[in-house]
Image (tube, coloured by chain):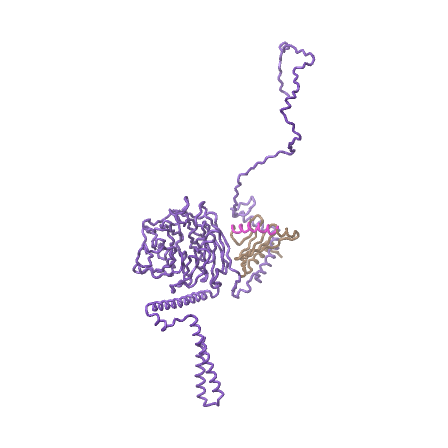
Chain colours: A brown, B purple
Amino acid sequence: FLHPPPSWDVEETLKRLQSQKRVQVIMVVNTEGIPIKSTMDNPTTTQYANLMHNFILKAWSTVREIDPQNDLTFLQIRSKKNEIMIAPDKNYFLIVIQDPTE
Amino acid sequence: MEIVYVYVKKRSEFGKQCNFSDRQAELNIDIPPNPELAEQFVERNPVDKGIQCSTSMSEHEANTERFEMETRGINHVEGGWPKDVNPLELEQTIRFRKKVEKDENYINTIMQLGSIMEHCIKQNNAIDIYQEYFDDEDAVEVTEEAPSAKTINVFRDPQEIKRSATHLSWHPDGNRKLAVAYSCLNFQRAPEGMSHESYIWDLENPNKPEIVLKPSSPLVTLEYNPKDSHVLLGGCYNGQLACWDTRKGSLVAELSTIEFSHRDPVYGSIWLQSKTGTECFSASTDGQVMWWDIRKMSEPTEVVILDITRKEQLESALGAISLEFESTLPTKFMVGTEQGIVISCNRKAKTSAEKIVCTFSGHHGPIYALQRNPFYPKNFLTVGDWTARIWSEDSRESSIMWTKYHMAYLTDGAWSPVRPAVFFTTKMDGTLDIWDFVFKQCEPALSLKVCDEALFCLRVQDNGCFIACGSQLGTTTLLEVSNGLCTLQRNEKNTASSIFERETRREKILEARHREMRLKEKGKVEGKEDDQREEEPILTLEELVTKAEEEFFDIIFTELKKKEVEAMKKSKPVGPERDEEVEGEDQGEEEAAHVETPT
């Protein structure tokens, strides 16, 4: 009985996310700003990675400063045109851009 | 100590040996004290002497050299690849990515993050928490907020010698720029060394004007060409007309020749609506209105002399202080004069005398502003002496509406381009008044003190929200009015037009009455006085009232009598039905007729 290699689970997960309604872009970036996986072109992905990194650090430090026992789990930035959702981790960020339901 | 110098000298060369010996002390000098010398001194007791025991300090100023800082951003195009990976090599980057994807940590992290993300995405899709729930209802904001205005920006004349801001013009596209004409309007009192420059300001930057215009004589008026936003027309203090193209620089592109220009400062210059977009006309206090084509500025294409006696005499011409032109009525234009008369003219008339159609008089002083209402062009606003007046073209004897006499002279006025019932005026005491006559008719809806010196000119932006006003010291203030004053109110157009019509009607009735009275006066003078008096008694107001009362009561009594008669008839025995019905109908009709007249 062959287990599918674990990397397939990742693909599976990302595909599932992409197939959700109104999802425009998915990307996985590491803390160096290198896009591991992205549905957009490289320069744009790098730009997002850079901007999000600073933002995540700021949000994370804010949460921790208010309550040191607390931790940042998720970030959503809602704008007129879309919604940027970020799931941060120590090494990688998962960024999804969704169309707002309007 | 390695280095040593050896000095050798023979004992015989030393010289004689020193022989020291003792002897007694000898007194060499003895100076006894001289008491007479003490006479030269005065004893001081006590002695006052200040001493201080502290550290001695000195003060010294130092100013560091200015540290120049600049903020710059860097846009990264590539992320931080590790040293061994060349980002330009596709193979290497792919290999790196594949390596990361195989990393167990990566897989676990992504699985975890993925599940959180999925939850949120689904949540978003399920319910839109930002949905507008009451969107269907008409957002009719009955804003009870009080009208207000606030200053957004102030543009000061950068010159040392301050000049007045005499004219403002908004940039036709987007209204992000403001052209301001600066000059000194006090006759021959322009200070020496006053600069002739006028500026175009960018609204975002009040520190430095964006473009400088350099005419040979200070500009009194300045207007952007509505068709071509690079071209500006300026009327100079010496009567010339100057034209700029901002793409070509700040020097004048076209200038009219002195011989054929005006003899007095050009107080009004407006672009005309033409296919070429190069025609304009100007007016000045020398009594002439000239038409120009900017491609050939050496001579005006047409000249009209503002002589209301229609004899075209320059000596009896009235000086023009303001000019009005509405592109929806291209053949007509109006001129406001120094003598307080508005002259309405027709450009297409065949003879020059016929060009002057009619006059409206009513102001005691020069008419500084003249503008047609953008919604109802038959009505126009004039500002002069201490009042602002609204006129209708149909009523020539007097204005249909006017403000009270203010304490300060009014200098400029304009209608709001979005609300037919709102207009703005500026005064010599530095206040800006905003009038809204569907709201309040005896006072301005809002009165703002913009600055301490006099305000000379005013211009409303096309969206009706922003107003720029220029002052005597060259300070242009940009104000934003509250929403209520720049959004069209419900039913405002109808209300405004009905107000105009009502006032026009009232004036017409008064006019007719005056005419009648004047005719009667004439008739009295011509014929025999006694006979005239008996034949046509001039009814005074009281007599009219008593007459009306009598008529009214007569009608009431006749109706009451009729009702009594009817009641009596009904109480009588019933006759043939037909007659009664007919009677009833007739009576009903009569009653109805009588009911209407008393009202």
| Residue at position x 48%, y 84% in the image | B564
The percent position of residue B46, horizontal first and vertical second, equals 66, 31
Quarter of the image that includes the N terminus of chain B: top right
B175 relative to B117 in the view: left or right: left
**Residue B463 seen in the figure:** no
Q: Quadrant of residue B516?
A: bottom left
Q: Is residue B100 visible?
A: yes
B42 left or right, relative to B393: right
The residue nearer to you, when weighing B502 against B247, is B502
> Is residue A57 inside the magenta stretch?
yes
In depth, the one of A95 and B573 nearer the eye is: B573
B238 over B549 or under it: above or below: above
Dominant secondary structure of the residues highlighted in magenta in the image: helix
Tally of numbered tags: 0
Toward the front, the furthest residue is B530
> Residue A91 placed where, x, y %?
60, 50
Q: Please provide percent x and percent y for residue B179.
A: 43, 51
Magenta span of residues = A43-61
Q: Residue at x 46, y 90 (%)?
A: B575
Whether residue B401 appears in magenta in the rendering, the answer is no
Pinpoint residue B125: horizontal percent, then vertical percent: 57, 61
Q: Nearer the viewer, residue B328 or B536?
A: B536
Corner quadrant of residue B25 = top right
Q: Nearer the viewer, residue B39 or B188?
A: B39
Q: Quadrant of the C terminus of chain B?
A: bottom left
